[in-house]
Amino acid sequence: VIADRLIQLSQQDCTVECLVQTAMADTSELLGNLTTRRTALNTNRRRILDQIDALGGGIAERRTALKSVSKKIAELEEQKEQLDDEILQVDLEVETTKKKAVSAQSLTDSLTTFGDLYREALPEEKRELIRLRVNQLVWTP
């Protein structure tokens, strides 16, 4: 029954397309959220760099005490490094998400390959094929 359903899915382009669109909607939303997060992090990073530059300018013009400025610059540098780390994490998550993106053609090809293999398999191989395929397929209606 499971094998028949998987083979049937491979022959229904609209079903495969619907599955892909649903998966891609989630992926698109996640990528949008990650892009928004990255933009906010970059804005904060730029603000911190501007503060560091302003403090450096204050030192050059001898408007502020050197000790307090040095401490503030160290704090801002630490914040900048934390933001750099967060930006890197977001970039890595974006890349991971893009790699997991589903395409209609790859899903159709995968299901078609399953059908071809299943038709040629021995009974014990068929059980193993189903087990392997179902472990890879997550169905959330």
Image (cartoon, rainbow, N blue to C red):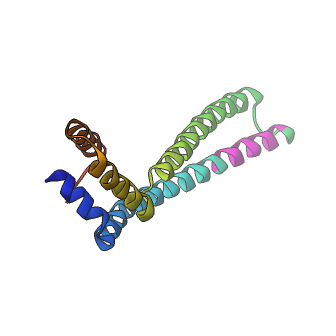
Magenta segment, prevailing SS (helix, strand or loop): helix
For the record, the magenta segment spans: 47-59
Residue 123 visible in rendering: yes
- Residue 130 drawn at (x, y percent): 23, 44
Q: Is residue 136 above or below residue 65?
A: below
Q: Residue at x 19, y 58 (%)?
A: 5
Q: Is residue 133 above or below residue 73?
A: below
Residue nearest the observer in this picture, 14 or 37: 14
- Residue 15 drawn at (x, y percent): 28, 69
Q: Quadrant of residue 64?
A: top right
Most extreme residue toward the left is 1
- Residue 118 drawn at (x, y percent): 28, 49
Residue 137 visible in rendering: no
Q: Is residue 12 above or below residue 83?
A: below
Quadrant location of the C terminus in the rendered image: bottom left
Most extreme residue toward the bottom is 14
Residue 124 relative to residue 76: left or right: left
Residue nearest the observer in this picture, 11 or 59: 11
Residue nearest the observer in this picture, 38 or 17: 17
Residue 46 relative to residue 112: left or right: right
Whether residue 42 is in magenta: the answer is: no
Q: Residue at x 74, y 41 (%)?
A: 55
Residue nearest the observer in this picture, 141 or 83: 141
Whether residue 50 is in magenta: the answer is: yes
Q: Quadrant of residue 135?
A: top left
Q: Is residue 22 above or below residue 83?
A: below
Q: Residue at x 27, y 42 (%)?
A: 129
Residue 106 relative to residue 86: left or right: left
Most extreme residue toward the right is 60
- Residue 9 drawn at (x, y percent): 26, 63
Report the number of numbered marks: 0
